[in-house]
Amino acid sequence: MDPWKADVKIKGGESKAFPPAVFLQLMRPRQWSKNVLVFAALIFSIRSADLFMLGQAVIGFVLFCLVSSCVYILNDYVDRERDRLHPEKKNRPLACGAINPHGALLCGLVLLAVCLWFAFRFHLAFGGVLALYFVLNVLYSLRLKHIVIADVLVVALGFVLRAVGGGLVIDVPLTPWFLLCTMLLALFLAIGKRRHELYLLQADQTAHRKVLKYYSMEMLNQMSAIVTTATIMSYALFTFTSGRSVHLMWTLIFVLYGMFRYLYLIHMEGKGGRPEKVLLEDRHILLTVVLYGFSVAFILLYL
């Protein structure tokens, strides 16, 4: 059985114990790709990077992955009834009854306590960022995801906290332009996700996510156009004002292609509900991200 896609059949609606493969699915390891942003500060500081900094960044990445899994467990616990009405999310462990919901929540809380204890001992400021990230996501799960516009802004802020955490663990300051680009790109992905959800659930928008009744396709398309333009302009300015090589401007072509490709997938192929899935399954975007990473490293090292 594939541990990433565990499909447990429940008889009589009874919840089972904790099969390791199903609990691993509950932690959503596929979505850990979002935490790669922790390495962004390391990549843009590659000239001064060493193995110690790499080790610090890896620890920060692992902690963000585990704490984000705690967030997913809480979110699935809160939304388990609504997830049963969703065509894809109904197969999640808590929604389908594969795991006892209260036991899963308890395990998530224990995992969270261990991670935060270690994070504060590892790096005090990073521990604060990680705790803020969790609190923000708790507020999102309980209330903020039901507030129009605030829901996508909170998602974007979560990505900014990842980037900030990555800079803290290697003691590298992050420029305002870099943080702005991070937030705008995250907004771009969050708006695309909302559009996909609205498209997928247009027959009954409020059955799964209440906030969808406050959105329309036209509104989301306009928001996407604004954020796309702002992201491209901000990144272009970042390449010139970051204090690094002006040759970073050549990497703008990868940003343009990646964003336009993602827009194509959203508007023409009806994708975008799970950005991490698109990243791993669309060869064009995956290759673009790889080439972007290598080009940034090469430029900063040799130009």
Image (cartoon, grey):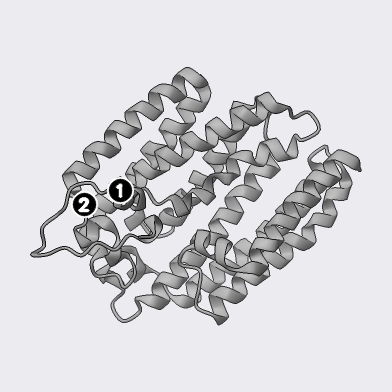
In the picture as drawn, the residue positioned furthest to the left comes out as: 12
Instruction: Using the rendered image of the protein, determine whether residue 242 is visible from the camera's viewpoint.
Output: yes
Number of numbered tags placed on the structure image: 2
Disc 1 target residue: 23
In the image, is 95 to the left or to the right of 270? left
Mark found first going from the N terminus, 2 or 1:
1
As drawn, 7 above or below 137: below
Residue nearest the observer in this picture, 231 or 281 = 281
Q: Tell me where residue 182 appears, x and y as whole percent.
A: 61, 48
Instruction: Kindly identify the amino acid type of the residue bearing the numbered disc 1.
Output: Phe
Residue shown at 78%/48% (left/top)? Answer: 296
Q: Tell me where residue 205 appears, x and y as whole percent.
A: 31, 73
As drawn, 196 above or below 104: below
Assess whether mark 1 and mark 2 are in contact (beta carbons under 8 angstroms). yes
Residue shown at 30%/60% (left/top)? Answer: 92
Q: Residues within 10 Å of mark 1 (few under 14, many from 20)?
A: many
Q: Secondary structure beneath disc 2?
A: loop
Q: Tell me where residue 282 appears, x and y as whole percent.
A: 60, 68
Q: Which quadrant holds residue 14?
A: bottom left
Instruction: Using the rendered image of the protein, determine whether residue 259 is visible from the camera's viewpoint.
Output: no
Instruction: Kindly identify the amino acid type of the residue bearing the numbered disc 2.
Output: Ile
Disc 2 target residue: 99
Measure the C-alpha gap from mark 2 to mark 1: 8 Å
> Considering the image in quadrants, where does the N terminus appear?
bottom left
As drawn, 173 above or below 18: above
Q: Tell me where residue 4 appears, x and y as whole percent.
A: 40, 57
In the image, is 218 to the left or to the right of 107? right
Q: Secondary structure beneath disc 1?
A: helix
